[in-house]
Image (tube, rainbow, N blue to C red):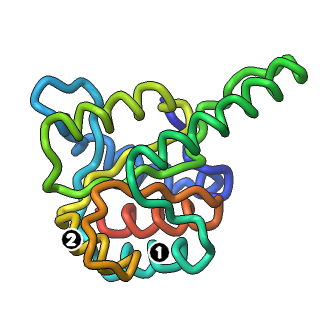
Amino acid sequence: MLRLPRLLETETENQILFHTMEKSFQVFSPEGTVKVPCVELSENLIQALAFARRCGTLRGGLESIETLLQTEEAGLASLRSKQKSKDPHRISRVLIFSNDGSDRFYRHCEAVLLKYGSRVFGIKINADSNLLGKSFFGKEKAVKAMLVSRKDAVIKVLSAIMSNS
């Protein structure tokens, strides 16, 4: 089971909110097994994602995200082998995806979550890819997947989601 980032984990209220939210998780693809929360694009979440964008830690595009995660995983594996430590299973990245993806897209998202699930938390947003692209990347281009990869931005996103539960 994934654990919250340390800063959020210290507050009992946050742990209770997270476990309550876990009960409403849904499988997001027809043949899928991975359960994720399906949330609305609230004002708090918009502000948290805008913060991540301003910090330069909001990445768009599933292929780009997967490349970044592969690179990070190689470095983490090397570090774990040198330190002889195990994976902490703590959320350090948030993968966000739109509600208008194809079955193939969602299977790809699920594969990414299965591969990097010890540190990546998936969230399906009730918003289409055009809105996500325009809102957070200033483009008229559709963005179906986004990754938040900085600790303080991840905490803001998780807090925004838990506050709406």
The residue indicated by pointer 2 is 130
Task: Decide which of 62, 110 is in the foreground and name it.
Answer: 62
Q: Which residue is mark 1?
A: 48
Q: Residue furthest left?
A: 30
Residue 131 in picture, x, y percent from top left = 22, 74
Q: Choose between 122 and 58: the one closer to the eye.
A: 58
Q: Quadrant of residue 155?
A: bottom right
Snapshot quadrant of residue 126: bottom left
Mark 2, mark 1: which one is toward the viewer? 2
Residue in the foreground of this view, choosing between 120 and 156:
120
Q: What is the three-letter code of the residue carrying label 1?
A: Ala
Distance of mark 2 from mark 1, alpha carbons?
19 Å
Dot 1: few (<14), some (14–19), or many (≥20) neighbours within 10 Å? many
Near-viewer residue (42 or 56):
56
Dots 2, 1 in contact, CB < 8 A: no
Q: Give me the residue at 41% from left, 33% from top.
A: 112
**Could you tell me residue 73's position as x and y percent?**
65, 32
SS state under label 1? helix
Residue positioned 63% across, 60% down in the render: 150
Q: Position of residue 148 (x, y in %)?
A: 51, 59
Judge left or right: residue 102 versus residue 140: left
As drawn, is 51 to the left or to the right of 128? right
Mark 2 surroundings within 10 Å by alpha-carbon count, few (fewer than 14), some (14 through 19), many (20 or more): some
Q: What residue lies at 58% left-to-right and 56% top-to-bottom? A: 149
Which of disc 1 and disc 2 is earlier in sequence? 1
As drawn, 126 above or below 12: below
Location of residue 129 by image quarter = bottom left
The residue type indicated by label 2 comes to Asn
Secondary structure type for disc 2: helix
Marks counted in the figure total 2
- Please say if 14 is above or below 35: below
